[in-house]
Image: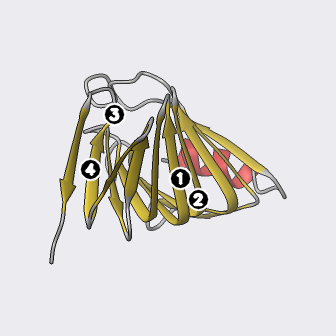
């Protein structure tokens, strides 16, 4: 955790780029780091978070997340990335798929993204919308829930 906090603090620049090493074996199935670019970065070692604001772009493998604000939460014991939350104008791109929402949560261990606030997923000419959409990265599986 101290190593990650030092890295984050040293990158407080007008344009921030941070790479997070992959989680422990068996947790992060991608084996690739998460790279995040933004206009500003705020870290809080006490709460184990890093908050990126302004033109945020987060990438891991072939998945890109664009948003106004992105908060990275670290696992308490390991200091590895546990989850990432994106807020405002969220766009998630993977190959020929596009997901849009007002809020999204990426769970690093399960490699799933859950979209909230008017979520839609586009693939070619197909569009799926609902109250909540869960997308499993690396699998051809999506779950859409609609409440009335």
Q: Which residue is mark 4?
A: 134
Answer with mark 1 or mark 4, whichever residue precedes in sequence. Answer: 1
Measure the alpha-carbon separation of dots 1 and 3. 15 Å
Question: Horizontal and vertical percent for residue 22?
Answer: 45, 29
Question: Horizontal and vertical percent for residue 97?
Answer: 45, 37
Of the numbered discs in the image, which one, if any, rests on residue 137?
3
Q: Which residue is mark 2?
A: 67
Answer with mark 3 or mark 2, whichever residue precedes in sequence. Answer: 2
Is disc 1 placed on a helix, strand or loop?
A: strand
Question: Does residue 80 appear in this view?
Answer: no
Q: Is residue 29 above or below residue 112?
A: above
Measure the alpha-carbon separation of dots 3 and 4. 10 Å
Mark 2 or 1: in front is 1
Question: Horizontal and vertical percent for residue 77?
Answer: 31, 47
Quadrant of the frame with the C terminus: bottom left
Q: Is residue 142 left or right of residue 67?
A: left
Of the numbered discs in the image, which one, if any, rests on residue 91?
1
- In depth, the one of 90 and 8 nearer the eye is 90
Q: Is residue 82 left or right of residue 19?
A: left
Is disc 3 placed on a helix, strand or loop?
A: loop
Question: Horizontal and vertical percent for residue 58?
Answer: 58, 44
- In depth, the one of 83 and 121 nearer the eye is 121
Q: How many marks?
A: 4
- In depth, the one of 121 and 84 nearer the eye is 121
Answer with mark 1 or mark 3, whichever residue precedes in sequence. Answer: 1
């Amino acid at each position: 955790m101290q190593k990650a906090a030092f890295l984050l603090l040293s990158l407080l620049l007008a344009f921030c780029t941070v790479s997070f090493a992959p989680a422990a074996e068996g947790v992060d199935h991608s084996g690739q780091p998460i790279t995040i670019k933004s206009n500003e970065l705020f870290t809080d070692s006490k709460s184990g978070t890093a908050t990126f604001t302004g033109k945020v772009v987060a990438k891991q493998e072939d998945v890109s997340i664009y948003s106004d604000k992105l908060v990275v939460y670290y696992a308490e014991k390991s200091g590895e990335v546990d989850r990432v939350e994106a807020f405002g104008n969220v766009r998630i791109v993977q190959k020929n798929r596009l997901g849009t929402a007002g809020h999204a949560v990426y769970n690093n261990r399960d490699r799933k993204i859950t979209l909230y606030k008017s979520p839609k997923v586009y693939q070619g000419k197909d569009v799926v919308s609902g109250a909540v959409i869960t997308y499993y990265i690396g699998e051809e599986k999506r779950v859409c829930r609609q409440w009335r």
